[in-house]
Image: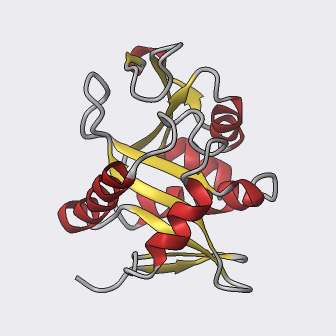
Amino acid sequence: MAEFRHETERLILRDWREEDWPAFWEGTNTPAVMRWLGGVGDEAKCRAAQERFLSYRREHGHTFWCLERREDGEILGFCGLKRSNQPGGPIGMMEVGWRLREDAWGKGYAKEAARASLDLAFDRFDADEVIAITVQRNEGSWGLMKRLGMRRREDLDFESAEFDEQDPFIIVYSIDRATWESRSG
C-alpha cells in the first residue's frame, strides 16, 4: 500500500511513523484533551489505540492520520477517517474524527483537517455519507460538526459510557455527499 500524504494550506495529514507516537501522546494524552474521551490513558490504552489506528489503515486504506503542521513539522494530533466501530453505534459507517493538542485549539486547524478528510471521504474513498460522534457536553466538537455542515442524526445516537461516565450517551452528526458537494463546490 502506497504511503498516504495529503497537504492543506497549513497541515499535512499522513501515515504514522514510529517516531510520531511519543510527541502525539505527550500533546494529546492530557486531562484537557482527554476530558470527553474517557480520560488520560495508561501505557496499555495508548498502545491499543496505536494498534487500532494502524489496523484501520491496513483494513480500509484510511485511518485517523497523523496531523503535522507544515511550517515546523510539529505533530498537532490526528484527523481522518475510520469505520465506526463503537458497540451500540452505527457500525461500519464512514466516520471522521479529530483530536488536537490543547495549544492547537482555536486556530482553525481541526476545521481545516476535517474539511480535507471529508473531501477525501467523498472523492477518494467514495463514501455516500460520513458521520462524526461525540458526547453532548463536548460543545467544541459538535460545534465544529455543525460548522462543517453536518446535521444531528438522533436516530443514530447510542448509549456508551466509554467517553463520559456522567452522561453515557453518544450523539451523532452526519453529512451526505450531495450536501458536502453543495457546500464546498
The N terminus: image quadrant: bottom left
Tell me, yes or no, if residue 116 can be seen here.
no
Vertical side of 76 occupied by 84: above or below: above
Vertical side of 58 occupied by 171: above or below: above
72 relative to 20 in the view: left or right: right
4 and 115: which one is in front? 4
Tell me, yes or no, if residue 23 can be seen here.
yes
- Coordinates of residue 164 in the picture (x, y in percent): 50, 23
- Give the residue drawn at x 47%, y 18%: 165
The C terminus: image quadrant: bottom right
- Give the residue drawn at x 64%, y 37%: 141
Vertical side of 29 occupied by 37: above or below: above
59 and 102: which one is in front? 102
- Give the residue drawn at x 75%, y 53%: 105
- Give the residue drawn at x 64%, y 22%: 137
- Coordinates of residue 61 in the picture (x, y in percent): 27, 67
114 and 160: which one is in front? 160
- Coordinates of residue 4 in the picture (x, y in percent): 39, 80
Name the outermost residue toward the front: 42
